[in-house]
Image (cartoon, grey):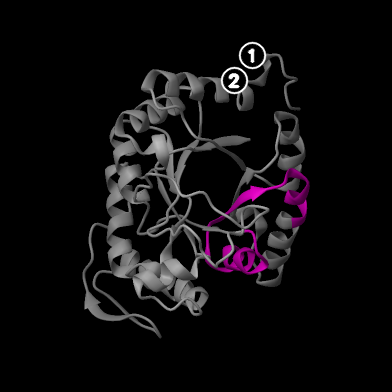
Amino acid sequence: MRVGLHALGIGDGARPEVIRAVATAAEKHGFARLWCGEHVVLVDAPASRYPYSEDGRIAVPADWLDPLLALTFAAAVTSRIELGSGVLLLPEHNPVLVAKQAATLDVLSAGRFSLGVGVGWSAEEFAALGVPFAERGRRTEEYLAAMRALWAEDPASFTGEFTRFDAIRVNPKPLRGGRLPVVVGGNSDAALRRAATLADGWYGFNVAASDVPARVAVLADECARHGRAFGELTVAVALSDGIPEDLPALGAAGVTELVVVGAPPPAPDAAATWVAELARTWIRPEECGAPTPA
């Protein structure tokens, strides 16, 4: 199973020297992909419930970088490891601008970028950006369709409820034949439906290992319901409670990438050592005395 690392862009992981150390060490030690998430706005006491913690609260870090810019920096110091936004909150953005930014990152990384998107959960964040919170799901679906038109066509035209353009040229194009892999994040049934119908993969975040098979089964059912082959999708999962011995069961359930989530230490040398230790635990467990997953 592929193993990704979600550790960039927040707190100490937002410092350029730490990004360089983590990215280069992750590539050296065999991680498949670097993930970086997004919040444009955070508030200290939100009324909105954070869906990825038991108490519904999210810690507010001192720093949180823009994921596309942070991943561009990571791309510049690496050459092989894949890159993914995990996730960019698409309905908060102008889709024409995101289409250009994402394609630019894909070109600069030599085709290593996947655009992970989500609908968001914070009404306060949407209010600060002047975007209606209630329409974020429909807006996300439409924006993806508009962006795919921009990536594939030149000139491109699109008419929708939230965005429209006529005979415009947006370049560069993604390197893989006018397509950029799109991954939908989120653990809800609605997110799984979007992944099955609109995307190239799913990213489940902070999921209990025991809950993964049921969530993947819902994804497979949505694929069948919409005439999609489940095997066409990548399935990436960040666990809330996993151990290396869980990997065989996750693979049997259909997971193709385990994403390790963590906060690197502030010193670059220590951050590189931290990545190496994670690799020994999750990629080469036999080096740390753990049984090798079958």
Q: In the rendered image of this protein, does residue 291 appear above or below residue 200?
A: above
Q: Residue at x 30, y 33 (%)?
A: 16
Residue 271 vs 37, above or below: the answer is above
Q: Residue at x 39, y 18 (%)?
A: 269
| Amino acid, disc 2 | Arg
Give left or right: position of 142 versus 66: right
Q: Position of residue 220 (x, y in %)?
A: 71, 60
Which mark is first along the chain, 1 or 2? 2
Answer with the quarter of the image where residue 142 lies. Answer: bottom left
The structure residue drawn at horizontal position 78% and vertical position 46%, both measured from the top left corner, is 210
Residue 79 in view of the camera? no
Instruction: Please identify the quarter of the rendering in which residue 34 is found.
Output: top left
- Extreme front residue here? 45
**Residue 3, above or below 277:** below
Taking the image as shown, residue 172 lies to the left or right of residue 263, namely left
Magenta-drawn stretch contains 207: yes
Q: Residues within 10 Å of mark 2 (few under 14, many from 20)?
A: some
Inspect the magenta stretch and tell me whether residue 120 lies in it: no
Disc 1 residue type (three-letter): Glu
**Coordinates of residue 63 in the picture (x, y in percent):** 37, 44
Which residue is the site of mark 1?
287
- Quadrant the C terminus occupies: top right
Q: Position of residue 88 (x, y in %)?
A: 43, 57
Magenta stretch?
Answer: 187-214
SS state under label 1? helix
Q: Which mark is residue 29?
A: none
Q: Quadrant of the N terminus?
A: top right
Residue 215 seen in the figure: yes
Give the residue pinned by disc 2: 280
2 and 1 marks in contact (CB < 8 Å): yes
